[in-house]
Image (cartoon, grey):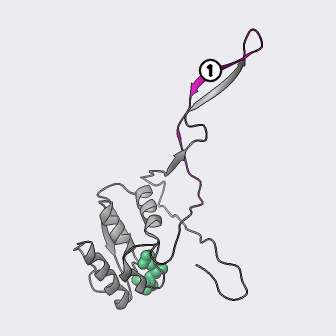
Amino acid sequence: MPQTGNRYHQHFEYMFVFSKGSPKTFNPITEPTKYQGLANMKNRGPNGSLDYEKVERTTEKKVGNVFFYSVGGGISTKDKVAYNHPAIFPEKLVADQINTWTNENDLVYDPFMGSGTTAKIAHLLKRKWLGSEISKEYAEIAEERLKEHTINNLFAAI
Ligand SMILES: C[S@@+](CC[C@H](N)C(=O)[O-])C[C@H]1O[C@@H](n2cnc3c(N)ncnc32)[C@H](O)[C@@H]1O
């Protein structure tokens, strides 16, 4: 988010991925390889011409571990009520992580649920979810937000 005062804008945050043993699920985000699957291998022909032999290559590769997300009003989420929370995650970040580490019907638990981003995205991605949030005010924001998406299994009071 933009910084005020005599300092540069903060452009990154770390994200830690902890696992007990090797992760059971890993559905990597991929991107197209540079040469899109077909490579031209150059061989010299008999008269010195270049022959091109087409060779199959993989079309997709795992992305690197630097992720870019746009943030801010109307970008992190379209849900206006969520912006009553001061530190929401962009929905795309949450979707990427849920898709990477879980499959449909898996359970996603967010111990710091805030405005309910994890619950919403887990629901839309057909995962079960569970959340806790220490602030009643924020839990109410999440409840309000999730109602718009007809998500009924709301937080238990803590
Ligand atoms: C960075 S915010 C999470 C924002 C959330 N990912 C979203 O998109 O809205 C962290 C949240 O953790 C909550 N929190 C802090 N300590 C907690 C605790 N011990 N138990 C439950 N929630 C806690 C805070 O009230 C805050 O809403």
Q: Residue at x 28, y 80 (%)?
A: 155
Give x and y (percent) for residue 152. 22, 74
Q: Is residue 51 above or below residue 114?
A: above
Question: Given the current orientation, which residue lies at the most extreme top position?
Answer: 46
Q: Is residue 63 visible?
A: yes
Query: Left of 18 or right of it: where is 148?
Result: left
Where does the magenta region start and end?
Answer: 44-66
User: Is residue 64 magenta-colored?
Assistant: yes
Residue labelled with disc 1: 53
Give x and y (percent) for residue 87. 48, 81
Tag 1: amino acid: Glu
**Res. 111 image quadrant:** bottom left
Give x and y (percent) for residue 129. 31, 68
SS at mark 1 in the image? strand
Quadrant for the C terminus, please. bottom left
Q: Residue at x 33, y 70 (%)?
A: 120
